[in-house]
Amino acid sequence: MQESKLEEHPKENEGEEFGELLRYTITGYIGGLLFGGILDLSGFQRSAIGQWLVRTISGEGESLLEGLYAFRKRLRGGEYGMAEAYGWGKLIGMTFPWWIDWGSRALGVDVYGVEGFYIPFFYAMSDQMGANISGMLYLRRNSTSWRDALIKYLHHPVMISGLILIFLVPTGLFLARTLGFSPSTQVLTAIETILANLCWIPPLLGWYMKRRERNHQP
């Protein structure tokens, strides 16, 4: 019964869709911490493969779940909404940091020092970049021109908050590494990635704005 209601009024229930994406993010955080703890206890504190997996789960675990969410939405049919576009974008963008991580290691970059600050940034935010691009394309498809789409983008709380985070997060990571922080264990790797992975903020804003709109409807 609830599912048919969602399909009947997709725009009115987009807030619930973003709420579901938010739960996926929390699941990724918990999974990353638990897996990091298991690796540390097993003696793999500095395992490169372990660090790759911990960062993927902590920073991009929600992207896998959000991609499944978007795929499920397509199978059910119905109107293509912003939350679904957001999920597809995050899934597409999640593999980019893998190449950066392993490429940096191959070039001899100290992934534990200041010079490697950008690696957790891409794990935490590359899916956000993909989501913003996908969201912009969605707005363009539902607009009369690129100018109209850009105006909608700049007034959309999910899109603009994601853009701000893309510039804010690397600054914080660089400062933390400069002050002496180093992801020397897998749990610390998970914590660093989780603190950088502020992708929960845009979905939270989307959920809040939609809920406020419904509460103010006559």
Image (cartoon, grey):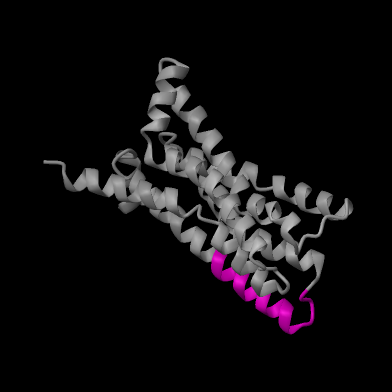
What residue is drawn where x is 51% and y is 49%?
A: 69
Count the marks.
0
Look at the image and tell me whether residue 71 can be seen.
no
160 falls in the magenta region: no
Depth check: give the residue in front, 180 or 79.
180
What residue is drawn where x is 40% and y is 31%?
A: 154
Depth check: give the residue in front, 164 or 199.
164
x, y (%) of residue 179? 63, 65
What residue is drawn where x is 84% and y is 55%?
A: 105
Where 137 sits versus 190, above or below? Answer: above
Quarter residue 186 falls in = bottom right
Per the picture, the main secondary structure of the magenta-coloured stretch is helix
Left or right of 47: which side holds 198?
left
Left or right of 119: which side holds 156?
left
x, y (%) of residue 143? 41, 20
x, y (%) of residue 125? 59, 49
Where 44 sits versus 79, above or below? Answer: below
Where 147 sits versus 209, above or below? Answer: above
Q: Outermost residue, front direction?
A: 179
Q: Outermost residue, bottom direction?
A: 41
What residue is drawn where x is 76% and y is 68%?
A: 50
Where 78 sits versus 149, above or below? Answer: below
Quarter residue 182 falls in = bottom right
Viewport quadrant of the C terminus: top left
Magenta region, residue range: 28-45
38 falls in the magenta region: yes
x, y (%) of residue 137? 51, 28
Left or right of 116: which side holds 7?
left
Look at the image and tell me whether residue 40 can be seen.
yes
